[in-house]
Image (tube, rainbow, N blue to C red):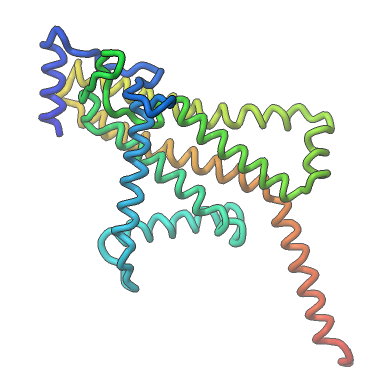
Amino acid sequence: MLHALASSGFFAQESAQATPSAPQPPAEVLFDIGFMPVTNSILTAWVVIAILVLFAYFSTRAMKTIPSGSQNFWELIVEAWVGITEQTMGRRRGRRFMPLVATAFLFILFSNWFGTLPIGYLYIRNPEGVEVPIFRSADSDLNVTAAMAILMIVLAEFFEFRSLGLLGYLKGLLIPNPMRWLEIFTRPLSLSFRLFGNIFAGEVLLATMLTVAPYVMFVFIGLELFVGLIQALIFSMLSLVFLSIATVHEEAHGQHDAHDSIESEVATASHGQPF
């Protein structure tokens, strides 16, 4: 890997025709499917999804009571996120939202790590005749991070609507409460820009160091792998918190119903018995 990085850095310096290696904020268009342009970040997202689906299928198609090999990886991920979600939201709500949050974590993590591979120097000529990189981390595209953030906030608002009902939800929106409206707009901005900014800055750093000091790239690759893990955790945990806040009323109703059920069982058991 280091040899490939060093070689690519050498040719980037020596070749007069080399394409600039530093990524630009807008994702580059590779080709069109009908009326839809496909950028290198979208292509990378499709590749990551295919890797995750195939990895999960081949790892779990012959599951064993005593796990081994790649089955251990998936059980570790599931057990870790079950524990996190249950501690944050309780058992009932945690089991319901764990697949969503864990899927977001895995997609973001693999997308971030895919962007650290020495594949940024692979170029292709797009329909406009411009040489553009084939692959680019999906999370270095603001469109992708904004789409994920909006999806999470829309889901949180939907579950809050289900939890409060129409009147309760409208009451929270219509009663003058600037913080309620502010959080609706700031949450997706915070989620999307934080993830995009960190991952895009990491790609710029790697591209710069690839040209300046390719033989110490392993230090910066290790740093970006760690940053990719942290950013995946931050996005997933914030999404979990937003979902937990949106459905906290369900937990209160569930505890009230359970309390009433226990009281009724005690009353039924003690009916007719002397005290």
Left or right relative to 250: residue 47: left
Report x, y in % for residue 128: 30, 13
Q: How many marks?
A: 0
Where residue 241 sits, quadrant-wise, is top right
Report x, y in % for residue 163: 73, 50
Q: Examine the rendered structure and indicate whether residue 31 appears above or below residue 274.
A: above
Q: Examine the rendered structure and indicate whether residue 240 appears above or below residue 128.
A: below
Q: Quadrant of the C terminus?
A: bottom right
Q: Examine the rendered structure and indicate whether residue 124 appears above or below residue 229.
A: above
Report x, y in % for residue 224: 32, 32
Q: Which of the pair 135/204 is nearer the observer?
A: 135
Report x, y in % for residue 223: 30, 32
Q: Which of the pair 117/17 is nearer the observer?
A: 17
Q: Which of the pair 77/155 is nearer the observer?
A: 155
Where residue 169 sits, quadrant-wise, is top right
Q: Examine the rendered structure and indicate whether residue 218 appears above or below residue 250.
A: above
Q: Is residue 208 visible?
A: no
| Residue occupying the point 74% across, 68% down | 258
Left or right relative to 77: residue 153: right
| Residue occupying the point 67% across, 41% down | 157
Q: Is residue 165 visible?
A: yes
| Residue occupying the point 62% across, 38% down | 154
Return the residue found at the far front: 34
Return the residue found at the far top: 16
Q: Quadrant of the N terminus?
A: top left
